Image: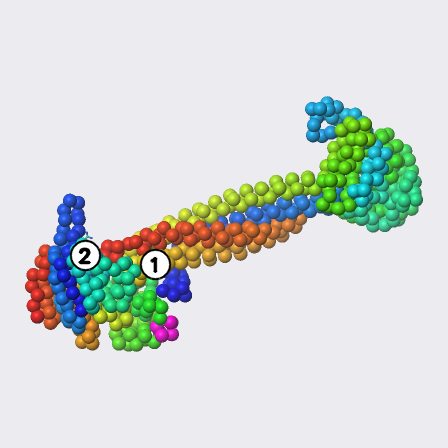
């Protein structure tokens, strides 16, 4: 469960203070499917980064599964990300010199899992994401949809409680985009909290809970 | 992140940029090879000189007439004049000191040698039989000056001289003329070649009294003394010096040199020289280190997005530091190892090209070359690694 109260994030540009997040209060239950929409610069990505512990709010409190994670050290936050959060990005963020299998393997390496166990886990995952025949291809040799599937496989291989996707279909054509959306929704069906930031109205409306942001504040929150 | 995975991950990165990695390793390798080859050269030269000196004999003290060091108090020495001769009697006197194992007085000159109708000028050495053990010289045939016949007119021919005058090899027992005197050939020296610029193969040796008469002198050229023990050489040197001063009515008019001291001086100078060239070679390693740092910094900025991703999937800052450090360590360790192999091959080639020169790199140079290379690599990796770990993940991820 994600509980934000009074979360504020201010960026300073010269003498100008930009309230990217302005006293956000938001609670998201485990297993929810939430879409976040809103005009460019309204603070969607910033909100997602705060939820994913990539960014620290300037004020406010954040409880993740009942634990106050606002004031954790960097190392502790890294551990929380590793165990509870999965990120999916618009630009995939695959490491170009590593194969699909090796990209998926990265989170497992971080946990110190022995190579033999990793191998089994990767095989299962590749199969589940329909990537078995692409295991030894580099990102440059994969299509956009395949790349995003690899990225999602990497984000979920450690079974995070929350999957945070920032415009996951932004670089994909419509058909492939909805396939990827379906894949994310399937993961949500298995109990993973899913938060999707998108500009795509159709994708946004597929979520059971739809949030609209404006100027760092939550404008609409409907379910 | 386990060490094994860390090493594998960073090796994977290095092999993904083969040209760049190869060039860095080459720079490292050349630095290490330079340290090894240059010290091999320096130490080889040192060993060569030390061996040359040792071949003359150890525990050696040399007495020469005249005072070398304090010319000011003794104007005659400057002019090459000796106020009092160093005589054969002085030599026998010194020979009775308890510290002396054996001694050989020496006179050197040039005279004409003739036999079997041939004639040539030769260097002659007047001495006693003790010269052989003292200077580690060996006879191929015959003998020289058995103690019973100290004063008989015997001559020992250098190997080359014997070959020239008696190509049939029947020199032993022949009579030859040296200057205006006749000598009986009683020995032929073994081939020894050059030693300290002194070729014993082209030398003839006669008893000291005959040499002094022939050269018309009563003063010795040198007195060579071998002491009983190596560790009392300083003490023996002092005793000999005092004995001679007493004998010369309190006049300090001889110079006493411990052969070891000369050797030690050469040893010191050449060691310093070796260290000096090693130091210069180490600078090239520092340059290679800077190269590694530069490449790693470029790598960090090229891989900013990757670092952001690593942070997003929960890689702690320490692991990110380790990843970049491991890359620097890989580059420098493989470079250092290649340099070690290159250096060994280089010194082997040196030994092949100059067989006289024992161009073996000293052990410390091998270790120092590798250690400095690895240290330079680690230090060079430190700054880029810290910079990578400090990157803000959101900023890093937004960079493409
Ligand atoms: N690092 C930063 N420095 C300064 N200002 C920033 C920084 N990051 C974000 N901002 C500002 O904060 C505000 C919110 O940015 P954010 O990226 O969250 O918007 P967004 O809703 O994701 O927009 P988009 O739909 O274009 O991705 C914007 O005005 C942006 O300019
Ligand atoms: Mg955004």
Front-most of B269 and B44? B269
User: How did the renderer colour the structure?
Assistant: rainbow
Left or right of residue B236: residue B176? right
Q: Residues within 10 Å of mark 1 (few under 14, many from 20)?
A: some
Q: Where is residue B49? Give x, y as percent.
A: 67, 44
The residue singled out by tag 2 in the image is A57
The residue singled out by tag 1 in the image is B318
Left or right of residue A39: residue B369? right
In the picture, the quarter occupied by the N terminus of chain B is: bottom left
Residue occupying image coordinates x 41% and y 48%: B290
Is label 2 in a helix, a strand or a loop?
loop
Q: Where is residue A190? Give x, y as percent.
A: 20, 76
* Mark 1 residue's CB less than 8 Å from ligand 1: no
Badge 2: chain ID: A
Left or right of residue B199: residue A177? left
Which residues make up the magenta segment? A114-119
Residue occupying image coordinates x 70% and y 27%: B70
Q: On the image, which quarter does residue A105 sit in?
A: bottom left
Q: Cα distance, mark 2 to mark 1?
A: 23 Å
| For residue B79, above or below residue A54 | above
Q: Residues within 10 Å of mark 2 (few under 14, many from 20)?
A: many
């Amino acid at each position: 469960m994600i509980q934000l109260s009074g979360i504020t994030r201010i960026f300073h540009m010269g003498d100008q203070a930009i309230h990217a997040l302005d006293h956000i209060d938001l609670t998201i239950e485990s297993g929810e499917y939430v879409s976040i929409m809103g005009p460019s610069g309204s603070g969607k990505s910033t909100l997602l980064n705060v939820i994913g512990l990539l960014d620290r709010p300037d004020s406010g409190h954040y409880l993740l599964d009942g634990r106050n994670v606002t004031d954790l050290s960097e190392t502790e936050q890294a551990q929380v990300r590793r165990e509870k959060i999965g990120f999916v990005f618009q630009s995939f963020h695959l490491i170009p010199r590593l194969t699909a299998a090796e990209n998926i393997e990265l989170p497992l390496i971080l946990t110190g899992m022995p190579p033999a166990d990793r191998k089994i886990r990767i095989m299962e995952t590749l199969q589940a994401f329909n990537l078995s025949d692409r295991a030894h291809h580099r990102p440059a040799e994969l299509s956009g949809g395949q790349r995003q599937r690899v990225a999602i496989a990497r984000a979920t291989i450690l079974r995070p409680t929350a999957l945070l996707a920032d415009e996951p279909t932004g670089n994909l054509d419509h058909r492939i985009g909805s396939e990827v959306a379906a894949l994310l929704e399937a993961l949500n069906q298995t109990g993973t909290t899913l938060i999707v930031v998108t500009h795509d109205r159709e994708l946004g409306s597929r979520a059971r809970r739809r949030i609209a942001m404006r100027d760092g504040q939550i404008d609409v929150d409907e379910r | 992140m386990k060490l094994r995975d860390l090493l594998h991950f960073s090796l994977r990165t290095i092999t993904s940029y083969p040209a760049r990695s190869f060039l860095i390793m080459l720079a490292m390798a050349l630095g290490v090879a330079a340290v090894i080859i240059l010290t091999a050269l320096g130490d080889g030269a040192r060993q060569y000189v030390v061996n040359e000196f040792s071949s003359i004999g150890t525990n050696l003290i040399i007495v020469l007439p005249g005072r070398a060091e304090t010319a000011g108090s003794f104007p005659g020495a400057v002019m090459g004049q000796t106020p009092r001769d160093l005589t054969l009697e002085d030599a026998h006197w010194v020979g009775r000191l308890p510290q002396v194992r054996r001694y050989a007085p020496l006179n050197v000159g040039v005279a004409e040698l003739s036999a079997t109708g041939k004639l040539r000028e030769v260097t002659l050495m007047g001495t006693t039989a003790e010269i052989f053990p003292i200077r580690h010289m060996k006879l191929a045939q015959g003998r020289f000056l058995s103690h019973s016949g100290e004063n008989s007119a015997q001559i020992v021919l250098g190997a080359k001289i014997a070959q020239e005058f008696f190509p049939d090899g029947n020199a032993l027992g022949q009579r030859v003329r040296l200057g205006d005197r006749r000598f009986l050939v009683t020995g032929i020296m073994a081939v020894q070649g050059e030693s300290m610029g002194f070729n014993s193969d082209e030398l003839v040796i006669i008893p000291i009294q005959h040499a002094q008469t022939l050269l018309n002198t009563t003063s010795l050229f040198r007195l060579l003394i071998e002491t009983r023990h190596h560790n009392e050489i300083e003490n023996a040197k002092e005793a000999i010096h005092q004995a001679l001063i007493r004998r010369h009515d309190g006049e300090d008019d001889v110079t006493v040199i411990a052969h070891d001291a000369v050797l030690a001086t050469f040893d010191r100078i050449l060691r310093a020289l070796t260290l000096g060239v090693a130091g210069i070679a180490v600078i090239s390693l520092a340059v290679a280190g800077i190269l590694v740092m530069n490449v790693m910094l470029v790598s960090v900025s090229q891989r900013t997005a990757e670092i952001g991703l690593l942070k997003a999937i929960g890689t702690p800052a320490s692991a990110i530091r380790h990843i970049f450090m491991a890359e620097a360590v890989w580059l420098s360790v493989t470079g250092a190892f290649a340099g070690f192999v290159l250096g060994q091959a280089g010194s082997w080639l040196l030994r092949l090209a100059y067989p006289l020169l024992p161009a073996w790199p000293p052990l410390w140079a091998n270790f120092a070359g590798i250690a400095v290379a690895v240290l330079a690599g680690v230090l060079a990796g430190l700054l880029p690694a810290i910079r990578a770990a400090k990157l803000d993940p959101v900023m890093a991820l937004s960079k493409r």
